[in-house]
Amino acid sequence: MIDPQRRRVVAGLGAACAAAIVPTLFPATARAATWPGHAVTFIVPFPAGGPVDTTARFTTQPLGQLWSVPTVVDNKSGAGGIVGAQFAAKAEPDGYNFFFASIHHAVLPSLRDNLSYDISRDFVPVGMAAVFPIVLVVNASLPVNTVSELIAYAKENPGKLSFSSSGTGGGTHLAGELFNAMAGVRIQHIPYRGSAPAMQDLLGGQVQVMFADGPSAVPHLKGGKVRALGVGNPTRSSMLPDVPTIAESGLPGYEAYSWSGVMAPKGTPPDIVKRMNADMVKVLSDPATAKGMIAAGAEPKPGTPEQFGEFVRDEIVKWRDLIKTANIKLE
């Protein structure tokens, strides 16, 4: 007969061994279940107040509430998103550092050959966060009401139309060049230092066309000085539900919009990436969060890591081909 004291000792040893063995046998499960244990940092490669920063804050605030730990938005802006990407690529891949990438990071590899990071090799996709509609708007004096009419007018009046953008190589510039290529027209590009002066000259009639980000376009549509012909989204935008897509209004197959999604430094544990994605989908699917984001100009678009990874790869190829065809170069 085993002594009761000895039985207790053996039982205690067994429990201790089991406690040691379980994390060894199921390390991913154990790690994901206890993550996060402290503050999580999200690197945003643009200044506070912009669309990517706004998306980051709408996403990370409810995540912090869900996890009961602080979420830190760290704005590392500079060089059109390069500074933040460089910093994020070197961050510790421990599940406590994430990066809000954007369309810029799919475009930059085709515009700069000296990047110190590789967006495809140095990061792993976590999930799409939001898309930002690009709206094709024209000065109200231009005698066109649809995309088809704009294409016909441009062909009948070669060299007479120009479009403004927020800067060379940006999403609104590339949207215009894609339009030119697919429609077989030549609307002259006029770059500006930001969306505000680009919109101002559209309002004043110095340029006739603009591919504008949603927040820049919406306030002026009610004033009657500009008219929206279409949005670049694959489906109609929640922000402008009465405006058709450019594809349905006269240019089938056209898609151009800005976006932002979360990536993690290469080497981040896959189980944490999976957990992070699941929690992102949860908060971005919340109606209250979606309503606030749409009001701010961002449309939540949660999905799987695999979907986001494939999307980014497709974006890199799409814009690389266009940049080469249109011979776009940074000044």
Image: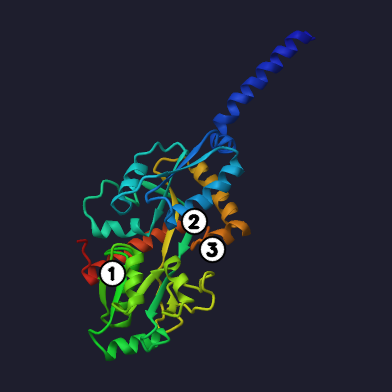
CA gap, disc 3 and disc 1: 32 Å
Q: Amino acid at mark 1?
A: Leu
Q: Amino acid at mark 2?
A: Ala
Name the foreground residue: 68 vs 139. Answer: 139
Look at discs 1 and 2 and give the one toward the viewer: 2
Asked which secondary structure carries label 1, the reply is helix
- Whether residue 130 is situated above or below residue 97 in the rendered picture: below
- Whether residue 279 is situated above or below residue 18 in the rendered picture: below
> Pointers 3 and 1 in contact (CB under 8 A)?
no
Category of crowding for the residue at label 2, using alpha-carbon neighbours closer than 10 angstroms: few (below 14), some (14–19), many (at least 20): many
Residue depicted at x 35% and y 74%:
210
Residue 173 appears at what percent x and percent y? 31, 68
What is the quadrant of the C terminus in the image?
bottom left
- Residue 77 disc label: none
32 sits to left or right of 108: right
Residue 136 appears at what percent x and percent y? 40, 76
What is the quadrant of the N terminus in the image?
top right
Asked which secondary structure carries label 2, the reply is strand
Q: Residue beneath label 1, please?
A: 322
Residue depicted at x 38% and y 38%:
91
Of mark 1 and mark 2, the one earlier in the sequence is 2
CA gap, disc 2 and disc 3: 15 Å
> Pointers 1 and 2 in contact (CB under 8 A)?
no
Name the foreground residue: 18 vs 310. Answer: 310
Name the foreground residue: 21 vs 229. Answer: 229
Q: Amino acid at mark 3?
A: Ala
Asked which secondary structure carries label 3, the reply is helix
